[in-house]
Amino acid sequence: MTDMFKKGEPYLIKAKPGETYAICTCGHTQDPPFCDGAHKQHPPKKPHLHKVQQVEDLYACGCGGSKSAPWCDGTHKSCPEHDNYMKRW
């Protein structure tokens, strides 16, 4: 089993209009940051469903410290400051 929050940096999702993404919130997925059903063994967590309206880059938390979970909020210190991540602000 993997722990998607050990990455320590956000997962980039190149979102496409009309798609709905199920983002893992339990951290036990084998396909981070997407839900693979592992939450069924870790209740009460459920995936966060995000329907995309326009082309956008989404950043899912990869450390578990975000206060805006499942999205990376940039306030935790474990996320490295690489260019694509920091360009959000």
Image (tube, rainbow, N blue to C red):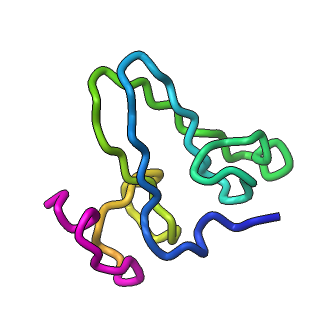
Check the picture and name the quadrant holding the N terminus. Answer: bottom right
Side of 59 where 30 appears, left or right: right
Q: Residue 63: within the magenta?
A: no
Write the residue at 50% across / 65% down: 62
Was residue 88 drawn as part of the magenta stretch in this picture?
A: yes
On screen, residue 68 versus residue 7, left or right, reads: left
Q: Residue at x 35, y 80 (%)?
A: 80
Is 8 left or right of 85, judged from the image as shown? right
Q: Tell me if 20 is positioned left or right of 39 in this view.
A: left
Q: Is residue 65 above or below residue 41?
A: below
Q: Nearer the viewer, residue 25 or 88?
A: 88
Q: Quadrant of residue 26?
A: bottom right
Q: Is residue 83 above or below residue 68?
A: below
Which residues lie in the magenta part? 77-89
Q: Main secondary structure of the magenta part?
A: loop
Query: Which residue appears farthest toward the left when viewing the image?
Result: 89
Q: Residue at x 75, y 54 (%)?
A: 30
Q: Position of residue 66 (x, y in %)?
A: 41, 64
Q: Quadrant of the C terminus?
A: bottom left
Numbered marks: total: 0
Which residue is at a point 63% across and 64% down the rendered structure image?
A: 4
Residue 27 percent coordinates (x, y): 66, 59
Measured from the top left, where is residue 59 in percent x and y?
Answer: 38, 53
Q: Residue 71: percent from the left, percent from the top?
A: 40, 52
